[in-house]
Image: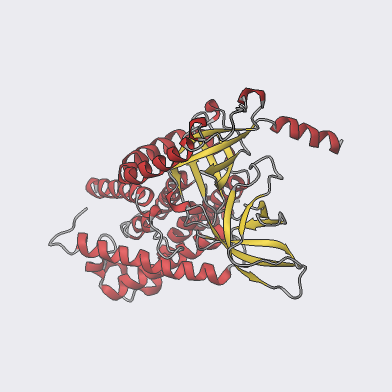
Amino acid sequence: MRNLFLFFRKHYFIFLFLALEMISLVLFFRFNKYQNAVMFKWTSGISGGIHSVYRDISEYFSLKEANFILGEENAALHARMPEAIYLSDTAMFSRNDTLFQSEYRFINARVISNTTNQRNNFLMISKGRLQGVEPHMGVITGNKIVGQVVNVSSHFSWVLSMLHSESKISARFMKNNQMISVEWPGGDYKKGVVREIPKHLQVIPGDTVVTSGNSEVFPNGILIGIIDNLTIRDNENFNTATLTFLTDFNSLGYVEVVVDMFRSEKEQLKASFRE
Amino acid sequence: MTNLILRNSVRFVFLVLFQVLILNHINLGGFTNPYFYIYFILLLPFATPRWLMLLLAFFLGISIDLFTNTYGLNAAATLFMAFSRPYVIRLISREPEETFGIQPSLRSEGFKWFFFYSLILVLLHHTTLFYLEIFRFTEFFHTLLRVITSTAFTLVLIFLSEIIFHFKGRERW
């Protein structure tokens, strides 16, 4: 017993190292698997606050660009107002919007932290549970893809970026609706990879890839990217291709969270089928 | 002694904020990130008790992790680096330890010693960090390139601050 004690005392450095390293690794594997579930809730207040201050300051430097984007959006919206539509017929048709139930609602949020240089990237945005954000909601900017909410606290949300090794987006070609899937192989934040392209499909550089709308996360037709080039894989069942993202992940300022109004209905339907 | 503790505490806070608020936003060529905060471990006094060094490394890593939501990743890498520090010092030193200054520095230990000292430790830290983050071998060479370029970047920052802060007439912070 005494020898054992002396042994530990003599080599305490190694044992202390192993103990602390063990704690780190347990933290690492646990929290990255469960998307930082517990820690995020009680640290987001501190780190979120500091990131907010940082963002408040850095936002001043891009005010000009933000104004420009807002102006362009305004113009596009004005073009869709009834006043902007020329009526050639004397008979007037009006579409009362309240007769149709809208399928998606959008929550505008500010990006308060964002990375593009890690292998697994996340964003923190300024809206949380109190504003109606829930896990598994899609996040877009303009009409372009950004990522998916994985965790919410009262005032902030943690978004798994498209630039993450776990991101696998169900997509289709705009021209012929063929189903494919888009991933990010790491490295350049502008380049993605398209997998599961059927052999018979004609793919040319410049083809547009959009979301398929098969999941409850993204609406149909959200822009993902433009095909760069196709790689023929002779001994596999599918071809792959590289694409350039249309989203500039390095300059995200404001994003919209997609709220699917029929989500619970869709999920119930799927669940009932499984039983 | 109090002065030494104060100086190291200020350096700890400063390096964490510098890393989180500025360096984490730097990204050269799509994959090169400097991890300058480990400069704190490099500069710990020679006489630091080894258990204290491990605890400091753990808290330094966890502080960085808190801001990047990678709990344990930086802590694991920094711990490994701190663990290796005494062995690296023994490996590269010709003279007995009594001839050393209070803390490792370019001025007191000379260019060659300090270069190998920081190169080996930074390389150990970056290798652990990047491979743990990826945790697969399919991107082995791409990750290796990230390790090498990021190590070079971090080393440049370390030598710049050595020259700026330690080559003045007397010891500063």
Residue B121 in sight in this render: no
Percent from the top left, x then y, of residue A65? Answer: 35, 46
Q: How many marks?
A: 0
Quarter of the image containing the C terminus of chain A? Answer: top right
Q: Quadrant of residue B96?
A: bottom left
Residue A132 in sight in this render: yes
Residue located farthest toward the right when viewing the structure as drawn: A275
- Is B132 positioned to the left or the right of A212 in the image? left
Residue at image location 74% in from the left, 75% down from the top:
A234
> Where A196 sits versus A236, above or below?
above
Q: Nearer the viewer, residue A72 or B41?
A: A72
Percent from the top left, x then y, of residue B152? Answer: 38, 69
> Where A203 sits versus A213, above or below?
below
> Where B92 sits versus B34, above or below?
below
Q: Nearer the viewer, residue A69 or B128?
A: A69
- Is B108 positioned to the left or the right of A270 in the image? left
Residue at image location 29% in from the left, 50% down from the top:
B11
> Where B10 sits versus A7, above or below?
above
Q: Quadrant of residue A180?
A: bottom right
Percent from the top left, x then y, of residue A238? Answer: 74, 66
Percent from the top left, x then y, of residue A25? Answer: 57, 52
